[in-house]
Amino acid sequence: MKYKDPKLNPSQLLVWVFVVFISLGTIALKLPFATTTPVSWLDAMFTATSAMTVTGLVVVDTAKAYTLFGEIIIITLIQFGGLGIMSFAVMIYKIIGKKIGLKERIVVQHALNQTSFGGVIKLIKKIFIFSITIELIATFFLAITWVPEYGLGKGMYVSFFHSVSAFNNAGFSLWSDSLMKFKGDPIINIVITFLFIIGGIGFTVLADLWEKKKFKKLSLHSKMMIIGTIAFNIFAMFLIFVLEYGNPKTLGGLTSLGDKLWGAYFQAVTPRTAGFNTLDIASFNESTIFLFLLMMFIGAGSASTGGGIKLTTFMVIVFSVLAFLKGKEDIVVRNRSIKLEFVLRSLAISTIGFIVIILAVFILNITENSSFLSVLFEVVSAFGTVGLSIGLTESLSMIGKFVIIFMMFIGKLGPLTLAFSLTQPKKSKVKYPSEDILTG
């Protein structure tokens, strides 16, 4: 009797690849020489999932619980998760001279969330060159601050760890309080935020900028991402500065205007899935935390190291609503019309994301002894692969940890990828008569 390989669609293959690597990461983090104190299998799996999905939520202190070997495992998972397992596989194929077939190209297309598989191999080459170059350059700049403080060896290691973690929007730090001790340091603020903004804007946009150089020649997607990112960051910084200016536990406790501006800026850009913080997130006003929730749900760019429903998804929905209110049949952005297919896709992503968040919040409200806001923040942070927390992570119950693991998993892969892994979408050739229904 001959064994037949199961036919997996690209979405199913991506899910299994992540499951396998998270499992391998869990086993590696359970090795005796990976930890300084005993870590349970569930906590090891939580950490491996958080690293692989580049989230940054932790149930044990990374710096205290893991040895150098354990930290290397974590940063390796972050690099794999951020740049993509399939991207690494393709590069290995190219190095050993193996031909990359149509199936592999389609899988990479799904992994990078591209509309076609044409040019994906070329895109992967650019991703690797750009990513490694940026991480190494950033390591050098971070070392300017950290080498004098920690010595050459440890200073370079700390700089490299945070460079990789920031570029991949992971949020893992080697300090228990993240980057709070460097809240007023210009180099740390500029380099770290530059890394996760560049990583979160999307590889497609970076490749587009690489080729075309000029803004006018960029694709509509690239223009929307760049303008949207700048606008969102400035708007969020202004709101945080106003809302927290008088809060003695956050901006109000900082002495100089420069420190206040750095604090507002860093906290404005980090909810876009970065996960680092220079101020205590739990000390912010509820109005600011609500702003964080919105930003975490929207997330970063498509085909980026970040999560969330993605900024362009949110923008397409907004433009669709505006077009409807204006009585327009076509959705036009910068003299380009958006196909109905992308509008429906955006609605599907947002709706599925909203539903899984509701279900997760409902379950955690039963299992966890915490406030509704803390639960909601934790769930949205996991879904957006952000990594920010207002104190619930370390006290999660066993069920709570499994729920957050699932949310990080679905947040990284995307709601549609997980949905397509469970059912293969098929286009029906049957057309039915239409009928009106009442809405609104």
Image (cartoon, helix red, strand yellow):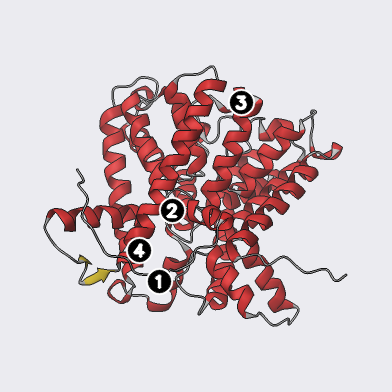
Q: Tell whether label 1 touches label 3 (CB within 8 Å).
A: no
Q: Mark 2 sits on what residue?
A: 197
* Mark 4 or mark 3, whichever is nearer to me: 4
Q: Would you say the residues marked 2 and 4 are in contact, meaning their CB atoms lie under 8 Å apart?
A: no
Residue at mark 1 to residue at mark 2: CA–CA distance: 15 Å
Which amino acid, by three-letter code, is at mark 2? Answer: Ile
Q: Amino acid at mark 1?
A: Leu
Percent across and percent down for residue 246 are 29, 22
Q: In this figure, which residue is indicated by the disc labeled 3?
A: 394
Q: Which residue is mark 1?
A: 209
Q: Residue 51 at x, y = what percent?
A: 63, 45
Q: Is residue 147 above or below residue 291?
A: below
Residue 38 lies left or right of residue 404; in this view the side is right
**What kind of element bears circle 1?**
helix
Residue under the point 68% across and 51% down: 19
Kindly give the residue lying farthest to the front in the view shown: 433
Quarter location, residue 322: bottom left
Q: What's the amino acid at mark 3? A: Glu
Residue denoted by label 4: 342
Question: Residue at 44% across / 71% down in the picture?
Answer: 115
417 relative position to 316: left or right = right
Residue 216 position (above or below residue 255): below
Image quarter where the C terminus lies is top left
Name which residue lies at 42% across and 78% down: 211
